[in-house]
Amino acid sequence: MRALFIGGTGTISSAIVRKLAADPMWEVWLLNRGSRPEATPAGVHQITADIHDEAAAAEAVKDMVFDCVCEFIGFVREDVERDYRLFKDKTRQYIYISSASAYHKPCADHVITEGTSLANPYWEYSRNKIECEKFLMEKYCEEGFPVTIVRPSHTYDERSIPLGVHGKNGSWQVIRRMMEGKPVIIQGDGTSLWTMTFNEDFATGYIGLMCNRSAIGEAFQITGDESLTWNQIYETIADALGVELNAYHVSSQFLAAASDKLGYDLTGSLIGDKSNSVVFDNSKLKRAVPAMRTTVPLHRGIRIALNYILDHPKECQREDPEFDAWCDKVIEVLEEAKKAF
Protein backbone atom coordinates (compact mmCIF):
# COMPACT_ATOMS: atom_id res chain seq x y z
CA MET A 1 0.00 0.00 0.00
CA ARG A 2 1.24 3.47 -0.88
CA ALA A 3 0.68 6.56 1.30
CA LEU A 4 1.57 10.18 0.61
CA PHE A 5 1.95 12.58 3.52
CA ILE A 6 1.68 16.29 2.83
CA GLY A 7 3.98 17.49 5.55
CA GLY A 8 4.92 14.40 7.53
CA THR A 9 7.51 15.80 9.97
CA GLY A 10 5.30 17.55 12.53
CA THR A 11 4.21 16.61 16.04
CA ILE A 12 1.40 14.32 14.91
CA SER A 13 2.49 13.15 11.48
CA SER A 14 6.05 12.17 12.44
CA ALA A 15 4.80 9.45 14.79
CA ILE A 16 2.54 8.02 12.08
CA VAL A 17 5.33 8.07 9.50
CA ARG A 18 7.73 6.27 11.89
CA LYS A 19 5.23 3.48 12.51
CA LEU A 20 4.39 3.04 8.84
CA ALA A 21 8.08 3.10 7.84
CA ALA A 22 8.61 0.04 10.04
CA ASP A 23 5.71 -1.84 8.41
CA PRO A 24 6.70 -3.71 5.22
CA MET A 25 3.11 -3.46 3.97
CA TRP A 26 3.46 0.29 3.45
CA GLU A 27 5.37 2.37 0.93
CA VAL A 28 5.59 5.84 2.46
CA TRP A 29 6.13 9.10 0.59
CA LEU A 30 6.50 12.63 1.99
CA LEU A 31 5.74 15.77 0.01
CA ASN A 32 7.28 18.78 1.70
CA ARG A 33 10.04 21.35 1.28
CA GLY A 34 12.67 19.00 2.73
CA SER A 35 13.55 21.34 5.59
CA ARG A 36 13.69 18.59 8.24
CA PRO A 37 15.58 15.65 6.70
CA GLU A 38 16.62 14.45 10.16
CA ALA A 39 12.95 13.74 10.92
CA THR A 40 12.52 11.42 7.91
CA PRO A 41 12.99 7.73 8.79
CA ALA A 42 15.08 5.41 6.64
CA GLY A 43 13.15 3.88 3.77
CA VAL A 44 10.73 6.80 3.41
CA HIS A 45 10.62 8.39 -0.06
CA GLN A 46 10.95 12.16 -0.33
CA ILE A 47 9.25 14.45 -2.86
CA THR A 48 10.77 17.89 -2.37
CA ALA A 49 8.19 20.44 -3.41
CA ASP A 50 6.07 23.24 -1.96
CA ILE A 51 2.45 22.05 -1.94
CA HIS A 52 1.39 25.69 -2.26
CA ASP A 53 2.99 25.74 -5.71
CA GLU A 54 0.21 23.73 -7.34
CA ALA A 55 1.90 23.43 -10.72
CA ALA A 56 5.11 22.10 -9.20
CA ALA A 57 3.22 19.68 -6.96
CA ALA A 58 1.17 18.41 -9.91
CA GLU A 59 4.35 17.80 -11.89
CA ALA A 60 5.94 15.96 -8.96
CA VAL A 61 3.07 13.46 -8.60
CA LYS A 62 1.87 13.32 -12.21
CA ASP A 63 2.67 9.61 -12.70
CA MET A 64 1.71 8.48 -9.20
CA VAL A 65 -1.40 6.97 -7.60
CA PHE A 66 -1.85 6.48 -3.85
CA ASP A 67 -3.97 4.37 -1.56
CA CYS A 68 -3.98 7.26 0.97
CA VAL A 69 -3.17 10.95 0.74
CA CYS A 70 -2.72 12.38 4.24
CA GLU A 71 -3.01 16.17 4.59
CA PHE A 72 -1.43 17.71 7.70
CA ILE A 73 -0.85 21.32 6.66
CA GLY A 74 -4.23 22.30 5.24
CA PHE A 75 -5.40 25.31 7.21
CA VAL A 76 -7.72 27.25 4.90
CA ARG A 77 -10.34 26.31 2.28
CA GLU A 78 -7.97 27.17 -0.59
CA ASP A 79 -5.59 24.44 0.65
CA VAL A 80 -8.14 21.66 0.39
CA GLU A 81 -9.57 22.98 -2.87
CA ARG A 82 -6.05 22.67 -4.28
CA ASP A 83 -5.69 19.15 -2.86
CA TYR A 84 -8.99 18.15 -4.43
CA ARG A 85 -7.75 19.27 -7.84
CA LEU A 86 -4.42 17.51 -7.37
CA PHE A 87 -5.62 14.19 -5.97
CA LYS A 88 -9.27 13.60 -6.92
CA ASP A 89 -8.19 10.97 -9.46
CA LYS A 90 -5.04 9.85 -7.67
CA THR A 91 -6.12 8.39 -4.34
CA ARG A 92 -8.52 5.86 -2.85
CA GLN A 93 -8.68 7.87 0.39
CA TYR A 94 -7.90 11.44 1.39
CA ILE A 95 -7.50 11.97 5.15
CA TYR A 96 -7.78 15.56 6.36
CA ILE A 97 -6.50 16.73 9.74
CA SER A 98 -9.06 19.13 11.18
CA SER A 99 -9.22 20.10 14.86
CA ALA A 100 -11.34 19.35 17.92
CA SER A 101 -11.27 23.10 18.56
CA ALA A 102 -13.85 23.31 15.77
CA TYR A 103 -16.53 21.93 18.11
CA HIS A 104 -19.13 24.38 19.34
CA LYS A 105 -17.87 26.98 21.82
CA PRO A 106 -19.09 27.60 24.41
CA CYS A 107 -19.73 23.90 24.90
CA ALA A 108 -23.37 22.90 25.17
CA ASP A 109 -22.26 19.60 26.71
CA HIS A 110 -18.82 18.75 28.04
CA VAL A 111 -19.02 15.26 26.50
CA ILE A 112 -17.93 15.66 22.88
CA THR A 113 -18.84 13.28 20.06
CA GLU A 114 -18.37 13.54 16.32
CA GLY A 115 -22.00 14.67 16.18
CA THR A 116 -21.34 17.76 18.30
CA SER A 117 -22.01 20.84 16.19
CA LEU A 118 -19.13 22.81 14.71
CA ALA A 119 -18.94 26.52 15.57
CA ASN A 120 -16.22 28.62 17.15
CA PRO A 121 -16.74 32.39 17.20
CA TYR A 122 -13.50 32.95 19.14
CA TRP A 123 -10.84 31.43 16.87
CA GLU A 124 -10.33 32.02 13.16
CA TYR A 125 -8.10 28.94 12.98
CA SER A 126 -11.04 26.76 14.02
CA ARG A 127 -13.49 28.47 11.68
CA ASN A 128 -11.09 27.87 8.79
CA LYS A 129 -10.92 24.19 9.69
CA ILE A 130 -14.74 24.07 9.66
CA GLU A 131 -14.77 25.58 6.16
CA CYS A 132 -12.26 22.98 4.99
CA GLU A 133 -14.46 20.19 6.37
CA LYS A 134 -17.54 21.62 4.67
CA PHE A 135 -15.85 21.73 1.26
CA LEU A 136 -14.51 18.19 1.53
CA MET A 137 -17.80 16.69 2.68
CA GLU A 138 -19.60 18.49 -0.15
CA LYS A 139 -17.24 16.81 -2.59
CA TYR A 140 -17.88 13.46 -0.94
CA CYS A 141 -21.67 13.88 -1.09
CA GLU A 142 -21.74 15.28 -4.64
CA GLU A 143 -18.96 13.30 -6.32
CA GLY A 144 -17.88 10.51 -3.98
CA PHE A 145 -14.51 12.09 -3.21
CA PRO A 146 -13.14 9.57 -0.64
CA VAL A 147 -12.53 11.85 2.32
CA THR A 148 -12.02 10.98 5.98
CA ILE A 149 -11.98 13.80 8.55
CA VAL A 150 -9.78 13.45 11.64
CA ARG A 151 -10.13 15.84 14.60
CA PRO A 152 -7.21 15.79 17.04
CA SER A 153 -7.36 17.56 20.36
CA HIS A 154 -4.24 18.47 22.36
CA THR A 155 -1.57 16.14 20.95
CA TYR A 156 2.06 16.41 22.10
CA ASP A 157 5.39 14.64 21.62
CA GLU A 158 8.76 14.42 23.33
CA ARG A 159 9.80 17.91 22.19
CA SER A 160 7.25 19.92 24.20
CA ILE A 161 5.05 19.56 27.25
CA PRO A 162 1.33 20.37 26.96
CA LEU A 163 0.29 23.63 28.62
CA GLY A 164 -2.66 25.99 28.82
CA VAL A 165 -0.75 29.27 28.85
CA HIS A 166 2.59 29.77 27.12
CA GLY A 167 4.28 32.19 24.74
CA LYS A 168 5.19 31.99 21.07
CA ASN A 169 8.34 29.94 21.78
CA GLY A 170 6.51 27.02 23.38
CA SER A 171 6.83 25.32 26.73
CA TRP A 172 10.43 25.90 27.86
CA GLN A 173 9.88 29.24 29.61
CA VAL A 174 7.12 27.73 31.76
CA ILE A 175 9.35 24.78 32.65
CA ARG A 176 12.10 27.22 33.62
CA ARG A 177 9.72 29.26 35.79
CA MET A 178 8.74 26.06 37.59
CA MET A 179 12.37 25.08 38.13
CA GLU A 180 13.15 28.56 39.50
CA GLY A 181 10.16 28.51 41.86
CA LYS A 182 8.48 31.43 40.10
CA PRO A 183 4.66 31.60 39.93
CA VAL A 184 3.18 29.84 36.90
CA ILE A 185 -0.05 31.13 35.39
CA ILE A 186 -2.95 28.67 35.07
CA GLN A 187 -6.11 29.84 33.34
CA GLY A 188 -9.29 30.09 35.40
CA ASP A 189 -9.33 28.23 38.71
CA GLY A 190 -7.64 25.22 37.12
CA THR A 191 -10.60 22.88 37.64
CA SER A 192 -11.82 22.59 34.03
CA LEU A 193 -11.21 19.21 32.40
CA TRP A 194 -8.84 18.67 29.51
CA THR A 195 -7.55 15.76 27.43
CA MET A 196 -3.93 15.22 26.35
CA THR A 197 -2.81 12.67 23.77
CA PHE A 198 0.74 11.45 23.19
CA ASN A 199 1.53 11.33 19.48
CA GLU A 200 2.38 7.61 19.49
CA ASP A 201 -1.14 6.79 20.73
CA PHE A 202 -2.65 9.14 18.16
CA ALA A 203 -0.73 7.28 15.44
CA THR A 204 -2.45 4.01 16.36
CA GLY A 205 -5.88 5.51 15.82
CA TYR A 206 -4.88 7.27 12.61
CA ILE A 207 -3.22 4.25 10.99
CA GLY A 208 -6.29 2.17 11.81
CA LEU A 209 -8.36 4.52 9.65
CA MET A 210 -6.03 4.29 6.65
CA CYS A 211 -7.45 2.13 3.83
CA ASN A 212 -10.42 1.45 6.13
CA ARG A 213 -13.56 1.57 3.97
CA SER A 214 -15.77 2.22 6.99
CA ALA A 215 -13.92 5.52 7.45
CA ILE A 216 -14.81 6.98 4.03
CA GLY A 217 -17.21 9.92 4.32
CA GLU A 218 -16.88 9.96 8.10
CA ALA A 219 -15.34 12.17 10.78
CA PHE A 220 -13.41 10.77 13.74
CA GLN A 221 -11.92 12.43 16.79
CA ILE A 222 -8.67 10.84 17.97
CA THR A 223 -7.77 11.57 21.59
CA GLY A 224 -6.56 9.80 24.68
CA ASP A 225 -8.93 8.46 27.32
CA GLU A 226 -7.68 10.55 30.27
CA SER A 227 -9.52 13.69 31.33
CA LEU A 228 -7.61 15.71 33.93
CA THR A 229 -8.06 19.15 35.44
CA TRP A 230 -5.52 21.79 34.51
CA ASN A 231 -4.39 21.83 38.14
CA GLN A 232 -3.66 18.10 37.90
CA ILE A 233 -1.81 18.62 34.61
CA TYR A 234 0.48 21.30 36.02
CA GLU A 235 0.99 19.33 39.24
CA THR A 236 2.04 16.34 37.14
CA ILE A 237 4.65 18.49 35.40
CA ALA A 238 5.96 19.82 38.72
CA ASP A 239 6.12 16.29 40.15
CA ALA A 240 8.19 15.15 37.18
CA LEU A 241 10.57 18.09 37.70
CA GLY A 242 10.79 17.37 41.42
CA VAL A 243 9.64 20.87 42.36
CA GLU A 244 6.75 22.47 44.24
CA LEU A 245 4.15 24.01 41.93
CA ASN A 246 3.68 27.73 42.56
CA ALA A 247 0.35 28.14 40.77
CA TYR A 248 -1.14 31.54 40.03
CA HIS A 249 -4.73 31.39 38.75
CA VAL A 250 -5.94 34.10 36.38
CA SER A 251 -9.27 34.54 34.62
CA SER A 252 -9.14 33.36 30.99
CA GLN A 253 -10.92 36.54 29.94
CA PHE A 254 -8.24 38.66 31.63
CA LEU A 255 -5.44 36.66 30.01
CA ALA A 256 -7.04 36.98 26.58
CA ALA A 257 -7.49 40.74 27.00
CA ALA A 258 -3.89 41.11 28.17
CA SER A 259 -2.33 39.07 25.36
CA ASP A 260 -2.61 41.54 22.46
CA LYS A 261 1.11 42.33 22.48
CA LEU A 262 2.27 38.85 23.44
CA GLY A 263 2.49 37.47 19.92
CA TYR A 264 0.29 34.51 20.81
CA ASP A 265 -3.49 34.32 20.47
CA LEU A 266 -4.86 33.55 23.93
CA THR A 267 -8.39 34.55 22.93
CA GLY A 268 -8.58 31.67 20.45
CA SER A 269 -6.48 29.15 22.33
CA LEU A 270 -8.21 29.75 25.69
CA ILE A 271 -11.73 31.13 25.18
CA GLY A 272 -12.12 29.18 21.96
CA ASP A 273 -10.54 26.01 23.27
CA LYS A 274 -8.61 25.25 26.47
CA SER A 275 -10.69 27.11 29.04
CA ASN A 276 -13.66 24.86 28.21
CA SER A 277 -14.19 21.54 29.98
CA VAL A 278 -14.21 18.72 27.45
CA VAL A 279 -14.40 14.94 27.67
CA PHE A 280 -14.18 13.06 24.38
CA ASP A 281 -16.35 10.05 23.63
CA ASN A 282 -14.11 7.92 21.40
CA SER A 283 -16.51 5.00 20.95
CA LYS A 284 -16.93 5.66 17.21
CA LEU A 285 -13.17 5.52 16.64
CA LYS A 286 -12.79 2.37 18.74
CA ARG A 287 -15.47 0.60 16.72
CA ALA A 288 -13.48 1.34 13.57
CA VAL A 289 -10.06 0.82 15.20
CA PRO A 290 -10.31 -1.71 18.06
CA ALA A 291 -6.57 -1.37 18.80
CA MET A 292 -6.99 2.27 19.86
CA ARG A 293 -6.24 2.85 23.55
CA THR A 294 -4.11 5.05 25.77
CA THR A 295 -0.69 3.45 26.29
CA VAL A 296 1.15 6.65 27.30
CA PRO A 297 -0.80 8.29 30.16
CA LEU A 298 0.05 11.88 30.99
CA HIS A 299 2.34 11.13 33.93
CA ARG A 300 4.50 8.97 31.65
CA GLY A 301 4.31 11.24 28.62
CA ILE A 302 5.39 14.26 30.67
CA ARG A 303 8.48 12.41 31.89
CA ILE A 304 9.34 11.31 28.35
CA ALA A 305 9.04 14.90 27.16
CA LEU A 306 10.95 16.49 30.05
CA ASN A 307 13.82 14.01 29.71
CA TYR A 308 14.13 14.87 26.03
CA ILE A 309 13.81 18.63 26.54
CA LEU A 310 16.43 18.72 29.30
CA ASP A 311 18.80 16.56 27.23
CA HIS A 312 18.41 18.70 24.07
CA PRO A 313 18.95 22.32 25.11
CA LYS A 314 19.76 23.67 21.63
CA GLU A 315 16.68 22.11 20.07
CA CYS A 316 14.09 22.50 22.83
CA GLN A 317 15.11 25.19 25.30
CA ARG A 318 14.02 28.31 23.45
CA GLU A 319 14.12 31.28 25.77
CA ASP A 320 11.10 33.61 25.73
CA PRO A 321 11.94 36.71 27.78
CA GLU A 322 8.91 38.56 26.42
CA PHE A 323 6.56 35.88 27.77
CA ASP A 324 8.45 35.73 31.06
CA ALA A 325 8.11 39.49 31.54
CA TRP A 326 4.44 39.33 30.52
CA CYS A 327 3.74 36.73 33.23
CA ASP A 328 5.43 38.89 35.84
CA LYS A 329 3.44 41.92 34.68
CA VAL A 330 0.09 40.10 34.79
CA ILE A 331 0.80 38.91 38.32
CA GLU A 332 2.02 42.36 39.43
CA VAL A 333 -1.10 44.07 38.08
CA LEU A 334 -3.43 41.61 39.80
CA GLU A 335 -1.57 41.81 43.10
CA GLU A 336 -1.83 45.63 42.98
CA ALA A 337 -5.55 45.31 42.23
CA LYS A 338 -6.01 43.16 45.35
CA LYS A 339 -4.49 45.90 47.50
CA ALA A 340 -7.22 48.30 46.38
CA PHE A 341 -9.68 46.28 48.47
Image (cartoon, grey):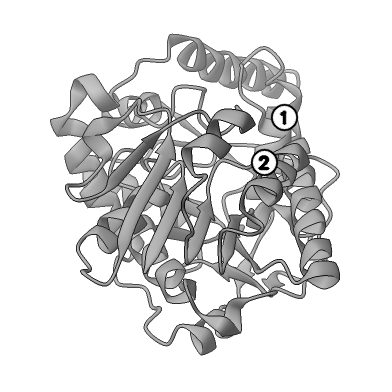
Residue 160 position, x and y percent, is 35, 39
Could you say which quadrant of the image residue 246 lies in? top left
**For marks 1 and 2 on the same chain, the one whose residue lies earlier in the sequence:** 1
Q: Residue furthest front?
A: 63
Element at badge 2?
Answer: helix
* Residue type indicated by callout 2: Leu
Q: Is residue 62 above or below residue 15?
A: above
Q: Determine contact: label 1, label 2, CB under 8 Å.
A: yes
220 or 225, nearer to the observer: 220
Q: How many marks overall?
A: 2
Pick the front one: 148 or 158: 148
| Residue 300 in view (yes/no) | no
The location of residue 231, given as percent across then percent down, is 48, 52
Residue at image location 63% in from the left, 46% down from the top = 86
Asked if residue 121 lies left or right of residue 83, the reply is: right
Q: Which residue is found at the position 84% from the left and 63% from the top?
A: 138
**Disc 1 element:** helix
Left or right of 29 on screen, residue 327: right
Residue that carries the numbered disc 2 in the rendered image: 270
Residue lying farthest left? 311
Per the image, the residue denoted by label 1 is 256
